[in-house]
Image (tube, rainbow, N blue to C red):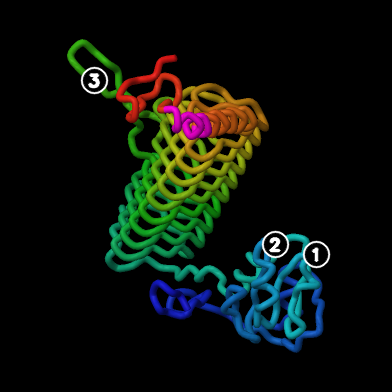
Amino acid sequence: MNPASGWPEVAGDPRFFAGTGPHSVEAIAAVVGGTVAGSGLATKVSGVAPLAAATPDQLSFLDNRRYGAALEATRAGVVIVHADMLPRVPAASLAIVTPEPYVGWARAAALFHPPPPVRPGVHRSAVIAENAEIDPTAEIGPFVCIGAGATIGPRTRVGVGAVIGAGVVVGAACRIGEQVVVSYALIGARVRIFPGARIGQEGFGFATTATGFLTVPQLGRVILEDDVEIGANTTIDRGSVHDTVIGAGSRLDNLVQIGHNVRLGRGCVIVSQAGISGSTVLEDYVMLGGQAGLTGHLRIGRKARIGAQAGIMSDVPAGADMAGSPAQPLRTFFRELATLRRMARAYDRAGKTDAGTGRSGAGTPDPAAGHTNTD
């Protein structure tokens, strides 16, 4: 039971998530890539659930050792676990043992709740330019607007109220969410754009003159390579003269801002509310924590990791871990933080020691003495 709402806790509520099954334990193990162990009695599994709420006909998993007690108490008929946790699986449960339980869970959950299929066709309320090209296997939802010369690839879904601008190319098997706006963009295959995202709008570019600001035409494009995911309400500016590029397999969270001419390599991860200023380059597999900010014209090396709320103002070498604002190497950041904490504790101790003598520390106001100590 969810204590806040009073509703029972359910994974895969059928009102929202179409399901398949039941599936045999052997079929699930094959999808997971694991082996079945234990003396439990389950042969079929009807659905998935968290450890605390699972019933004997459901599947659950454990990936974090901190929740070992929940594993020991679960009623789940089948659990996906690492071999190290097998001794803690209840006798009434079967285990599917795999080196990567969370990966296994992702595959099993997708078996029970696969993405909804594309329903080919164009809704009668959609507005489609005469020379737009829409593959007959694509699904175009209600109130969609598709501009002149745009191309929508096979098995692609365009959600309610989305706007696909003139000349935009959308590849195969993409998912364009509700009220997404895409312009000046070329999109690869299997790209997913969540609701409310804005792709290809004019970048923040202007020249300063004696009489005010002069807008600089933004003449580049946005390139989203294959298998990219763009979170809800994220914004990606088109390039000014170069293209803005999001590399293959990269994942952008909700509420991310990407400036003009930014180039992301393959497999980058950008967490919510991070912002990247214009013309900065992230090499392959860079990770940015939430609310991190990067100034323009930087290069962030391959596999660098930037901590949450970090402020990056200079280039970062490959493989570096950075934190703080202005950012510095992670070990330096925590060493300085520890030093400040020791100084603060020492100051507090000194204040308590001097309290009986009317002194609260050098250079600090002393209410009892009515003056400021300076000795």
Amino acid type assigned to the residue bearing label 3 in the image: Phe
* Closer to the camera in the image, 356 or 107: 356
The verdict on residue 354 being magenta is yes
Q: Which mark is residue 213?
A: 3
Q: Which residue was labeled with disc 2?
A: 65
For residue 63, above or below residue 69? above
Q: CA distance from mark 1 to mark 3?
A: 63 Å
Mark 1 lies on a secondary structure that is: helix
Could you tell which of marks 1 and 3 lies nearer the N-terminus?
1
43 or 267: nearer the eye? 43
Quarter of the rendering containing residue 216 = top left
Q: Which mark is residue 84?
A: 1
Q: Are marks 1 and 2 in contact (CB under 8 Å)?
A: yes
Residue 176, horizontal then vertical, whole percent:
43, 56
Q: Quadrant of residue 177?
A: bottom left
Mark-to-mark CA distance, 2 and 3: 57 Å
Residue count near mark 2 (Cα–Cα under 10 Å), binned few <14, some 14–19, many ≥20: few
Q: Residue at x 63, y 73 (%)?
A: 111
Query: How many angstroms separate mark 1 from mark 2 (CA)?
Result: 10 Å
Q: Nearer the viewer, mark 1 or mark 3?
A: 1
Element marked by disc 3: strand
Is 169 within the magenta?
A: no
Q: Are marks 1 and 3 in contact (CB under 8 Å)?
A: no
